[in-house]
């Protein structure tokens, strides 16, 4: 998954974590205030271009997006059938593509389908935009941000450590799965109940491995004097530069303009 930091020298990597988080917040707000799938598609495109700019491994996006495809299809079907033609302002969106029942029942509307596309685009936008942050931001910068937000250091450390170990646990899960398949285990095959049971040989070693890892981490932290002092120092402190302020102002102008456009009924269905 695109959740671990890659030390590549790009302009996005050099931005302050607060600037990137503000950009993520702005693009998420814009995605949710507009109902038009066209506008949300451009937000997905912008997020994807930012990932390319950050030299992210685009091929690894398949690991994130592929499991979501069945959910996307279900969302398109549900929204297409659950929204009646009267729910939309545009005459085009009130058109009915087909009926589920032969006696003219359960219409599948154009507007419902477009609304489903909008929901799909919103999820993709948040996945891609959040990946930009995790790919270009060191975990130490996020920890410093929590500290500047006056969050207790112990809580901030627990959260950031949990984020840090997600890629590690994912790799361990893949190793355990490959080892069990080599031993002849059938993973993810058969019916629903059989598929659930097939993951037990992976789940149990993962739990044991997680407990062992957390115990080793606790011992290592105690040996290094964690918690002995109320305050801590950082090797490099996060600082907002002129570029960060300029970009933040641009993001604010775009966000305000988007809210103004939404109040003028732009991007409605």
Image (spheres, grey):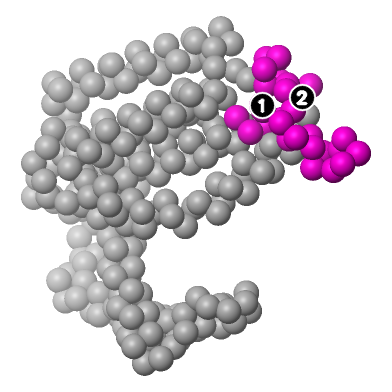
Image coordinates for residue 84, horizontal then vertical, percent:
78, 29
Q: In the rendered view of the protein, which quadrant contains the C terminus? A: top right
Which element carries disc 1, helix, strand or loop?
helix
Q: In the rendered view of the protein, which quadrant contains the N terminus? A: bottom left
| Residue 220 left/right relative to 29 | left
Q: Mark 1 points at which residue?
A: 111
Instruction: Give residue 165's quadrant in the image.
Output: bottom left
Depth check, front residue: 18 or 253: 253
Question: Measuring 67% from the left and 28% from the top, which residue is drawn there?
Answer: 110
Instruction: Give residue 114's quadrant in the image.
Output: top right
| CA distance separating discs 1 and 2 | 7 Å
- Do the residues under discs 1 and 2 have CB atoms within 8 angstroms? yes
Depth check, front residue: 228 or 158: 158
Image coordinates for residue 211, horizontal then vertical, percent:
36, 81
Is 108 a magenta residue? yes
| Residue 114 left/right relative to 65 | right
Q: What stretch is highlighted in magenta?
A: 85-114
Q: Name the residue under label 2.
A: 85
Please report whichever mark, 1 or 2, sits nearer to the chain's N-terminal start.
2
Question: Measuring 44% from the left and 41% from the top, which residue is drawn there?
Answer: 124
Q: Looking at this rendering, what residue extends furthest in the top direction? A: 264
Graded by Cα atoms within 10 Å as few (under 14), some (14 to 19) or many (20 or more), the crowding at tag 1 reads many
Question: Measuring 25% from the left and 74% from the top, which residue is drawn there?
Answer: 217
Graded by Cα atoms within 10 Å as few (under 14), some (14 to 19) or many (20 or more), the crowding at tag 2 reads many
Is residue 158 among the parts visible in the rendering? no
Instruction: Give residue 212's quadrant in the image.
Output: bottom left
Q: Is residue 132 above or below residue 251?
A: below
Q: In this view, does 74 lie above or below 201?
A: above
Is residue 38 among the parts visible in the rendering? yes
Q: Looking at this rendering, what residue extends furthest in the bottom direction? A: 183
Is 190 a magenta residue? no
Image coordinates for residue 147, horizontal then vertical, percent:
27, 46
């Amino acid at each position: 998954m695109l959740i671990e930091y890659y030390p590549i020298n790009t302009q996005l990597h050099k931005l302050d974590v607060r600037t990137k988080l503000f950009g993520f917040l702005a693009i998420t707000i814009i995605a949710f205030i507009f109902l038009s799938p066209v506008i949300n598609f451009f937000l997905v495109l912008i997020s994807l271009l930012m990932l390319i700019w950050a030299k992210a491994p685009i091929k690894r996006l398949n690991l994130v997006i592929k499991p979501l495809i069945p959910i996307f299809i279900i969302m398109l079907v549900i929204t297409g059938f659950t929204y009646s033609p009267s729910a939309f302002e545009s005459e085009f969106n009130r058109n009915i593509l087909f009926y589920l029942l032969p006696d003219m029942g359960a219409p599948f509307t154009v507007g419902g389908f477009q609304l489903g596309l909008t929901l799909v685009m919103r999820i993709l936008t948040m996945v891609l935009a959040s990946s930009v942050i995790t790919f270009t931001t060191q975990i130490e910068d996020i920890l410093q941000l929590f500290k500047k937000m006056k969050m207790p250091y112990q809580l901030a450390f627990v959260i950031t450590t949990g984020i840090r170990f997600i890629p590690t646990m994912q790799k361990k899960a893949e190793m355990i799965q490959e080892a069990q398949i080599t031993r002849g285990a059938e993973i993810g095959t058969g019916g629903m109940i059989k598929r659930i049971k097939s993951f037990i040989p992976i789940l149990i070693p993962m739990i044991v491995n997680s407990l062992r890892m957390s115990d080793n981490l606790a011992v290592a932290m105690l040996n290094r004097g964690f918690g002995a002092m109320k305050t801590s120092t950082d090797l490099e402190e996060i600082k907002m530069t002129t570029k960060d302020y300029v970009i933040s102002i641009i993001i604010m102008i775009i966000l305000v303009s988007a809210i103004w456009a939404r109040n003028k009924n732009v991007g409605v269905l």
